[in-house]
């Protein structure tokens, strides 16, 4: 259901089923004896907020604390272990060992493995399931499953995907509205940005006021601010842009920590999430508004992932142009390492950010689960956009293909 993009429609049913699996006397212990079953159970349970320990994998480890080599031939088990390892929290060493072990064996598949499984392994090694955009992944799964035969569930998935696509098309049309008279005084390169921002912010403000009937949502915070405004988010974003411009103009390469403290803000991720919060929250609570104002980790971490994935994709071109505001360039300067080594450092930073963010799957958050899901999806969007290069600054055929499959071309079942 979740791979087909239908999970949201059956969320309560899925949670009830998972609770039954965990209830005393449930007949699920036999499944857990297989690596595939244990890894799949771990991933799904943790993904849905259930407390489950990495210790479930100890039964697959030898006396020296390494995973048993005999498991390497179980391709489906290795794939499930690899997927599960990406839901690790900070400091979970067993899951880190699991990832290394799984990658080692998945990269050296037996030629006798079916093509479908080979394709799935290649797809996962490029980017794990946990970091993929759900809607694009749903389309891929629908097309893959439809080749095995048509079912009512697949027909439902197709209808749901195409409905979501129609919504995206309407949103895009709304973003393309312009009042040309309002931008006559601006230079051409600013008109598009201004109009998109003007229309979106005003529409959002109108809908929020209409929904809440003009109520104010007071916030009492240490900073003394009386309310949270998206304007302050835009102010901080512009301030971060200005800092980057100063570094470039002065040809200064900042330290890694200094760069990242500014870079997560210049990614614009926190602005997107704040807008999303006000557009989607049925009722705004004081604690949530304070967390937005103070840039909770749920805003910072996906924004940092956004910044770092962008840097990996655009660094070569930026270094060639002599630009200094890039985490890879900062690592090269501060640590005295090569570009390849610096890229590895940035990749490790991305992994660490994901591990810190993963705690919100299970541990209590100020925000409700729908907003937590938005934060995850922002990080996933970043991976999608910058997975194979800079799809914004220098889009290639694959980038355009993703846009078409997501927004333009409806999905249909194989004949």
Image (cartoon, rainbow, N blue to C red):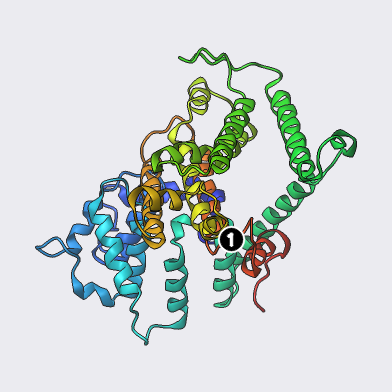
414 shown above or below 168: below
Residue 351 located left or right of residue 5: left
In the image, residue 355 sits, relative to residue 224, either above or below, namely below
Residue 362 in sight in this render: yes
Going by the image, does 317 lie left or right of 407?
left
Q: Is residue 271 above or below residue 102?
A: above
> Which is nearer the eye, 321 or 148?
321
Circle 1 residues within 10 Å: few <14, some 14–19, many ≥20: some
Residue 349 x, y percent position in the rendering: 38, 49
Residue 293 x, y percent position in the rendering: 52, 25
Residue at the (13%, 65%) spot, across then down: 62
Q: Is residue 327 above or below residue 107?
A: above
Q: For mark 1, give the secondary structure.
A: helix
Residue at x 72%, y 50% (from the top left corner)? 167
Point 47% across, 78% down: residue: 116
Image quadrant holding the C terminus, namely bottom right
Can you identify the residue that label 1 sits on? 136
User: Residue 182 placed where, x, y %?
Assistant: 86, 33
């Amino acid at each position: 259901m979740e791979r087909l993009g239908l999970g949201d429609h059956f969320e309560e049913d899925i949670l009830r089923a998972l609770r039954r699996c965990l209830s005393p006397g449930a007949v699920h212990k036999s499944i857990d004896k297989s690596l595939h079953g244990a890894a799949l159970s771990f991933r799904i349970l943790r993904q849905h907020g259930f407390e489950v320990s990495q210790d479930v994998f100890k039964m697959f480890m030898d006396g020296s604390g390494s995973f048993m080599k005999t498991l390497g031939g179980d391709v489906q088990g290795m794939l499930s272990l690899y997927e599960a390892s990406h839901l690790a929290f900070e400091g979970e060493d067993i899951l880190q060992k699991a990832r290394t072990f799984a990658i080692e064996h998945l990269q050296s598949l037996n030629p006798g493995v079916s093509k479908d499984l080979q394709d799935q392994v290649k797809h996962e090694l490029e980017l794990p399931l946990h970091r993929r955009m759900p809607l694009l992944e749903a389309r891929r799964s629908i097309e893959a499953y439809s080749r095995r035969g048509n079912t009512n569930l697949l027909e439902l998935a197709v209808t749901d995907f195409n409905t979501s696509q129609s919504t995206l098309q309407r949103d895009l049309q709304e973003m393309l509205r312009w009042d040309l008279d309002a931008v006559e005084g601006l230079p051409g390169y600013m008109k598009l940005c201004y109009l998109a921002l003007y229309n979106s912010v005003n529409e959002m403000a109108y809908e929020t006021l209409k929904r809440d009937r003009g109520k104010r949502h007071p916030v009492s915070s240490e900073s003394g601010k009386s309310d949270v405004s998206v304007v302050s988010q835009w102010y901080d974003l512009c301030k971060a842009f200005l800092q980057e411009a100063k570094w470039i103009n002065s040809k200064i390469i900042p330290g890694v920590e200094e760069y990242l403290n500014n870079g997560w803000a210049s990614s614009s991720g926190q602005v997107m999430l704040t807008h999303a919060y006000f557009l989607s929250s049925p009722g705004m609570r004081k604690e949530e508004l304070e967390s937005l104002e103070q840039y909770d980790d749920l805003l910072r971490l996906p924004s940092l992932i956004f910044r770092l994935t962008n840097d990996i994709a655009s660094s070569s071109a930026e270094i060639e142009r002599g630009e200094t505001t890039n985490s890879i360039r900062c690592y090269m300067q501060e640590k005295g390492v090569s570009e390849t080594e610096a890229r590895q450092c940035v990749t490790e930073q991305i992994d660490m950010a994901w591990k810190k963010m993963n705690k919100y799957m299970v541990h209590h958050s100020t925000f409700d689960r729908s907003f937590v899901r938005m934060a995850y999806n922002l990080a996933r969007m970043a991976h999608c956009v910058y997975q194979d290069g800079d799809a914004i600054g220098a889009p290639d055929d694959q980038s355009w293909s993703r846009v078409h499959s997501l927004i333009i071309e409806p999905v249909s079942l194989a004949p």
